[in-house]
Image (cartoon, rainbow, N blue to C red):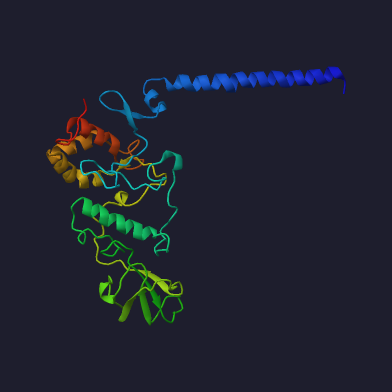
Amino acid sequence: MRFADLVRGHWAALRALLVFTVVLGIGYPLFVWLVAQIPGLHARAEGSLITDPAGRPVASALIGQAFTDTAGRPLPQSFQGRPSEAGIGYDALASGASNLGPESIVDMPDQPSLLTQVCTRSVDVAKTEGLDVRASARPFCTAGGRGAVLAVFGPRGPSGTVARPTRVVSVNEPCATESELFVSRYHGVRVECARPGEDYSAGQIVPIRGAAAEHPRVPADAVTASGSGLDPDISPDYAELQVERVAKARGIRAEQVRAVVRAHQSGRLLGFLGEPRVNVAAVNLELDHEHPVPGCCSDG
């Protein structure tokens, strides 16, 4: 190859590098920055920040946060968000879920099943909101907040299900005696307590629905984490469930709390995408400013 051709090739490559550096390294970022300054887009580009009355950023409307005391207990004066599996909770650097699905109904020694997690959370929410735990029971849950699941042993029929049970074990519910079990008999067979370390995988796993209402008092978003673990919103149903507790803790009327909730409630995107939602951080911030807890604190 002649030296002149070599120079021309390198000069062409250098010109391409310079052009792409100007266009993609300077021009494109500058264009994106200018678009972000358009009214209506600027706040979103800055992170959809929520500020307090003094103008200080205290939260993002896009990322949830925990409203608990130092021991992790829900603050009675604050609305609670969805459970979070992101790090220790709402950690934007560890966004993620438990990766457990509908088939996760049997507890493992080192991890409760998704069903038991949902049942436990439902009991906790019912207690926090002052509901009757038994009246607020969820389908497939025991009264103690465990997955109501049996391992059924016996000869199997053509479909693979146990035709005539000979032994039945409650696999999730801890108990010392059979009198403590959520159900005493299954198809005429006495139900046994599970023994620590015993393997029941050979049995047919049968979840027991029970007599819970079709639509539990505690809504689904109160007991299930989002895929990101950062969901900042809750359903209007879950917000309504918390109104009385928050109003009592703040010493105001429930309707005053509902007015704040309505002010921060959004409908479906474009009228048909998603579900109505309430931003938890925005509601709590306005309540702290407009209706501070008596003898606690205020903005100013």
Q: Give residue 141's position: percent from left, percent from top.
A: 30, 63
Look at the image and tell me whether residue 22 can be seen. Answer: yes
Residue 129 vs 193, above or below: the answer is above
Q: Give residue 164's position: percent from left, percent from top.
A: 38, 82
Residue 27 vs 51, above or below: the answer is above
Look at the image and tell me whether residue 217 can be seen. Answer: no
Near-viewer residue (231 or 268)? 231
Q: Is residue 26 left or right of residue 191?
A: right
Residue 28: which quarter of the image? top right
Q: Give residue 284's position: percent from left, percent from top.
A: 25, 36
Quadrant position of the N terminus in the picture:
top right
Residue 4: which quarter of the image? top right
Q: Give residue 145's position: percent from left, percent from top.
A: 29, 61
Identified at 83% across, 19% down, the residue is: 5
Identified at 16% across, 39% down, the residue is: 250
Residue at the far front in the pictured view? 70
Q: Is residue 263 left or right of residue 7?
A: left
Identified at 68% across, 21% down, the residue is: 16
Identified at 51% across, 19% down, the residue is: 30
Q: Is residue 128 left or right of residue 83?
A: left
